[in-house]
Image (cartoon, grey):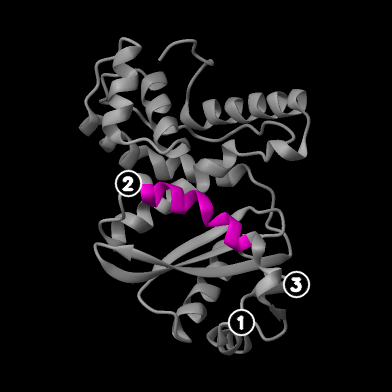
Amino acid sequence: MLGGLSVGSVSPSYKGHRYPVEVISHCVWLYFRFPLSFREIEELMLERGVLVSHETVRRWCGKFGQAHANGLRRRQPRPGDKWHLDEVLVKINGERKYLWRAVDQEGTVLDILVQNRRDAAAPRRFFRRLLKKTCSVPRVVVTDKLRSYGAAHREVMPSVEHRAHKGLNNRAENSHQPTRQRERAMKGFRSVGGTQRFLAAFSGISPHFRPRPHLITASDYRAEMTVRFAIWDQITGVTGRPTTA
């Protein structure tokens, strides 16, 4: 859980946008939190009396989504010392690609990467990217039994314990589920670059609003969500929680 609010982060610039910050922030939140299309968000906003086109919503999500995700990641604690890695097949414009994902023992997404193959070079590239991005070295790495993991592990982080077991890697496999849900809602991904950009923002924003309610009481869940919405408002530059868009 997130225990409190930190200060000092810089909100993104909305200069040149004729819509208020609250509207832009709300549309970006809707898109990355729920399996909605841009046209569905346009309709939801119309019901609230806000006239905004789906193309405008698309541009907002493309411009501000990653910035907001980065702001949320800066508020997260340091990664845990046990990393779970997994790769899944995704179809992008009809072609087979592989989505690589790493999470720590708390389920926090450390990074995602779309690659063409799952040979020895693919996990090696992902390992190096992880070390550079997190600026830390794990105590344990947990993967499935794909043999290319072992070769990459021995080359990139030989001092780290490696556990290769299908049953131990549920944490990373479960983290793929929201992505699969969005993939179905979007009727598949269209391009490698677009998929990477969307998932980079999605994996930073969506988990922020998923505090696993089955692990806490209803009152604690509401209190936790209040904190998380307040953090979102700080990240996006909203001055107060709006009652309307």
Residue depicted at 48% across the width and 44% down the height: 69
Quadrant where the C terminus sits is top left
The residue that mark 3 highlights is: 139
**Mark closer to the observer (1, 3):** 1
Residue depicted at 26% across the width and 59% down the height: 191
For disc 3, the neighbor class at 10 Å (few under 14, some 14 to 19, many from 20) is: few
Estimate the spatial distance between the alpha carbons at disc 3 and disc 2, rounded to whole Å: 37 Å
Left or right, 216 with reference to 184: right
Name which residue type carries label 3. Arg
The residue that mark 2 highlights is: 186
The residue that mark 1 highlights is: 145
Q: Badges 1 and 3: C-beta atoms under 8 Å apart? A: no
Q: Nearer the viewer, residue 211 or 228?
A: 211
Name which residue type carries label 1. Lys
Residue depicted at 67% across the width and 60% down the height: 104
* Magenta segment: 172-184
Left or right, 217 with reference to 116: right
Of helix, strand and loop, which one carries label 3? loop
Q: Position of residue 74 (x, y in %)?
A: 58, 45
Comes first in the chain, label 3 or label 2: 3
Q: Position of residue 82 (x, y in %)?
A: 72, 66
Q: Nearer the viewer, residue 74 or 84?
A: 84
Comes first in the chain, label 1 or label 2: 1
Of helix, strand and loop, which one carries label 2? loop
Q: Looking at the magenta stretch, what is its main secondary structure? A: helix
Picture quadrant where residue 117 is located? bottom left
Residue depicted at 41% across the width and 47% down the height: 182
Name which residue type carries label 2. Met
Q: Nearer the viewer, residue 44 or 109?
A: 44
Of helix, strand and loop, which one carries label 1? loop
**Mark closer to the observer (3, 2):** 2
